[in-house]
Image (cartoon, rainbow, N blue to C red):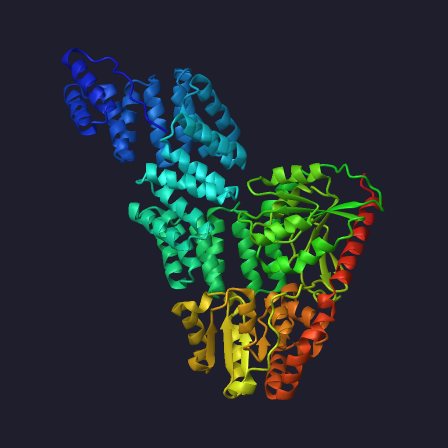
Amino acid sequence: MELTVAGGGDAGGGTAAVLAAAIADHRSGRLDEAMQRYAQVLRGEPNQPDALHYLGVIAYQKGNFALAAELIGRSLALAPDVADANHNLAMVEHAQGKTAAAVAHAERAVSLDPAFAMAWNTLGTTLKGVGRLEPALMALRHAIGLDPTLAQAHNNIGNAEQAASRLPDAVDSYALAIALDPGYGEAHNNLGNALLAMARVDEAVASLERAVRLRPDLPSASTNLAVALQAQGQGERAQRMAWRAVALNPAYADAHNNLATTLGETGRVGDTIQAFRRALDVNPASVAARCNLASTLRQNGELASAQAEYRKALALEPGNVDAHSSLLFCMLYDPRCDNATLFAEYRRWEQAHAAPLYARARPHANSAEPGRRLKVAYISGDFADHPLAYNIEDLVERHDRRQFEVFGYAQVPNPDTVTRRFQAKADRWRSTVGLSDAAVDDLIRADGIDILVNLAGHTANSRLLALAYRPAPVQVSYGIGTSGMTAIDYWLTDAVFHPDDTTEGHSETLWRLPVLVVHRPPPDAPDPTPPPSETNGFVTFGSFNNPSKLTGQVIALWARILRAVPGSRLALKFFAWFRTPMARQRLIDAFAAEGVEADRLIFLWEGRARREHLEQVARVDVALDSFPFNGWTTTFEALWMGVPVVALAGNRFLARIGASFLTAAGLGEHVAGTPETYVDIAVGLARNAALRSDLRRNLRGRVAASPLCNAEAYVRSVEAAYRAMWQRWCHADRH
């Protein structure tokens, strides 16, 4: 938005000439000269409204918003019917965050001068600031009707459209603004953000690079470019750009936030936490910085602190669905959180975010024929290089196409080779990136989906709220916890994950399959090697789980095992997490407190390729599963490499993953029901070299022949479940 400097009003004699000269200086950008002349006018006529008004405009241009509001307010007290002054005060109030007052003064400006295009533009921007998107768009379009060349209005329409999740429209509006004014740096900046939200990363980088060239002084352009470069995989450039944004404006919270994000990608945990805290020092109300800090704390195993930060974020913004889902996800890691407390939080999530959307559900037009070919859709943000992808790839590929037409709805901002592989396997593929939940509902209904399966639950990019509109007649959850939504009918599970006496709360009906999960064996896996203890002379326990799962209770139990097996070591790996000293030191200190010396810990971080990673897995004699959040892919990888896994079964889904996998593989004897039994099993394996050697030779074959790898049987069981669910819907009384 731009302030307006029009002609002078009533001023007599020599005052008029000085005022005219001041306005001429002002329009030419000679602010200091203009300020002196306005002050000269006011010395002669202290209540001259134009001089007060335009002196207030200069105060705004110099960043003194309080003085600007005072001076323009005094001008309006003397001459309340000046459209320019009302418009400019609206601008100042908008900059101060006084959105309601800004709207009122913008409305006053357009009522005084209905042909004032810039005032209509400002009215639209201020209305957007109070969340009134449709009236904002009407005002902005009116501005364009008055002046089609007004680039600012096209840019601001784009901002309103982006806020309404109408990203393709926003891109078009920004492009129009740039066509009218190619040097409009803010429009290039906004266009880059919209393109990034649509996963058009390369275009976003190009647009944001132009924004930085045009407006090197604009911190938001530099910080947004940092985000885009990070998404493009240019971590070092992203970090340099984030530092540049901080240098441009140390008080810009988003710059610190994005700097912390780029640091987080390098595994510099301590620096990341400090940078997020600096962002919050600058702006304690930054929900994004607080959630990012919470996520980093969770990743570092500081679960109580992480939950506290998520709750602070929700106190600032109760409607933030992502923050609330992240809190739930964090609580799943916490062994101190019982099932009743956890389910109560799921219910609070539903009431806050999903329940208000239930009334918008519409009747389904799907034909209620029990035996017809069904349209089954999978919706997820994990159709990419993600552990879940390896679990569901066979399901998507092997569906009987005579009975099922398979759709994929992908919330994948950065598609990769795995994404493209899934796209080729599905009969129909839709990207939901940039679409609102209501638009996703419309898309699913237009496709006529019969059974909709959410694969992500309360994890990133899940599109869970789209299911609150009930776009499909039958809705199913495939996740590590309940959705908490009564709009979802079924939760796929098995009898080990959820025995008959389960105490885990759930909003869905449990549907038990013979086995819930199958794995596709990694094609590039090296052959199993003899146990490493045969050559190095000591037993190596190991865990390649996310370090946020390594709570105090886990460390205490693992320390008991290490103390019971003299000379044993513990190997820990999670991508490149342990490359940094701080990440290692937390665990060194925690184990030291349990009487385990640092030289008994082996930290690994090399081997990003899967074959190299599996070679690292083979360095372990006995794998120790984490609890209450068990491993998933890590457990299967260990078994495939011939490494026995010891699991502690808990009382909710994610605490029984290991039990389900080991039972399916015929290794139920390695599942413990108590911490004491867990220690006994691990110590017993460590002391039985012959058994470990036998498992190394034969475990892969046993797993390959087990239900864990029987994709054909698994897919048929899932299809039978879908058919039964569908028949229930067909025979239900829906009137």
In the picture, the quarter occupied by the N terminus is top left
Total marks placed? 0
Q: Position of residue 161 (x, y in %)?
A: 51, 33
- Residue at 17 percent across and 14 percent down: it is 17
Q: Looking at the image, is 126 positioned above or below residue 234? A: above
- Residue at 43 percent across and 43 percent down: it is 205
Q: Position of residue 244 (x, y in %)?
A: 32, 48
Q: Nearer the viewer, residue 697 or 156?
A: 697
Using the rendered image of the protein, determine whether residue 480 is visible from the camera's viewpoint: no
Q: Quadrant of residue 93?
A: top left
Q: Looking at the image, is 276 positioned above or below residue 470? A: below
Q: Looking at the image, is 273 positioned above or below residue 631? A: above
Q: Nearer the viewer, residue 47 or 266?
A: 266
In the picture, the quarter occupied by the C terminus is top right
Residue 553 falls left or right of residue 735? left
- Residue at 60 percent across and 60 percent down: it is 387
Q: Quadrant of residue 473?
A: top right
Q: Position of residue 264 (x, y in %)?
A: 43, 58
Q: Looking at the image, is 204 positioned above or below residue 142? A: below
Q: Position of residue 517 (x, y in %)?
A: 69, 63
Using the rendered image of the protein, determine whether residue 453 is visible from the camera's viewpoint: yes
